[in-house]
Amino acid sequence: KRLALLAYLALARPRGYHRRDILLTLFWPELDQARGRKALSQSLFFLRRALSEDMVLSRGTEEVGVEFTHLHCDVMAFEEALGEERWEEALDLYRGELMAGVHLTNAPDFERWLDTERERLRELAAGAAWSLASQRIEAGELVPAERAGQRALLLVPTEESPVRDFIAALAAAGDRAAALRFYEKFRGVLAEELDLEPAQETEAIATALRAGRPDAPG
């Protein structure tokens, strides 16, 4: 719970200070106000002792935060890389879901927050992978582009619009075989993960590519 508290103080948006009453609701909803405040104070004392006195900050009596200049966090580094369009670096920082394996009993609001953050970061990583794939195609690096596209698929297999764009871009770059191969990969992931078939628009692109029709991409 102390680790989860530290992560929340660092990552909850908007970044900065957080009210103690919100923290009590998230982490100790089963306790009354007095016991909850005591549990929070004990946890903050432990974090200050384990890290440093100036790592966990207070603003007045009701707000708590962390000193970001003393803290390195891969999530913040990931978001910074995204903001500067350093797609490959961002993907290197994304190594799996946020706080994998962490689960708090009797803390449903925290669990909902964590699930939401996991989904948000996973979607951001998928977007970075699609951007990297596009960048690789523009550079004529089709094999690395395929690898980036496959990573995006594994992260968020349900977004078909970027899949169609990527297939069309591969075909336009002169590699229809790679475009069809990627379509089959997408179809397999969709079936295995969600027991679904591609949308008609996506299937139409693949059909046109197989037939070599003039309306096919590329």
Image (spheres, rainbow, N blue to C red):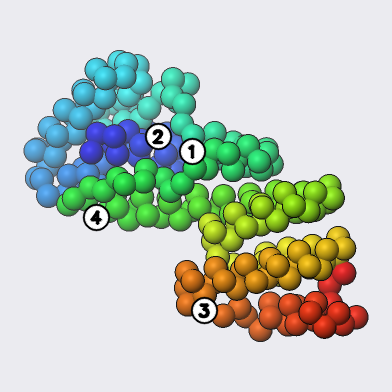
Decide which of 142, 48 is in the foreground and name it: 142
- The residue to which callout 2 is attached is 10
Q: Nearer the viewer, residue 33 or 144?
A: 144
Q: How many marks?
A: 4
Residue that numbered label 1 is attached to = 75
Residue 91: x percent and y percent? 59, 43
Q: Nearer the viewer, residue 195 or 57?
A: 195
Q: Secondary structure at mark 1?
A: helix
Circle 1 or circle 2, nearest the eye: 1
Image height of 214 relative to 161, above or below: below
Q: Of the residues under marks 2 and 3, which one precedes in the sequence?
A: 2
Residue 196 tag number: 3
Kindly indicate whether the residue at mark 2 contacts the one at mark 1 (C-beta within 8 angstroms).
yes
Label 2 SS: helix
Q: Amino acid at mark 4?
A: Pro
Cα distance between the residues tagged 3 and 4? 31 Å
Q: Tell me which label, 1 or 3, sits earlier in the chain.
A: 1
Quadrant of the image occupied by residue 206: bottom right
Q: Residue furthest right?
A: 214
Q: Is residue 112 left or right of residue 125?
A: left
**Camera-nearest label, 1 or 3:** 3
Do the residues under discs 4 and 2 have CB atoms within 8 angstroms? no
Q: CA distance from mark 4 to mark 1?
A: 22 Å
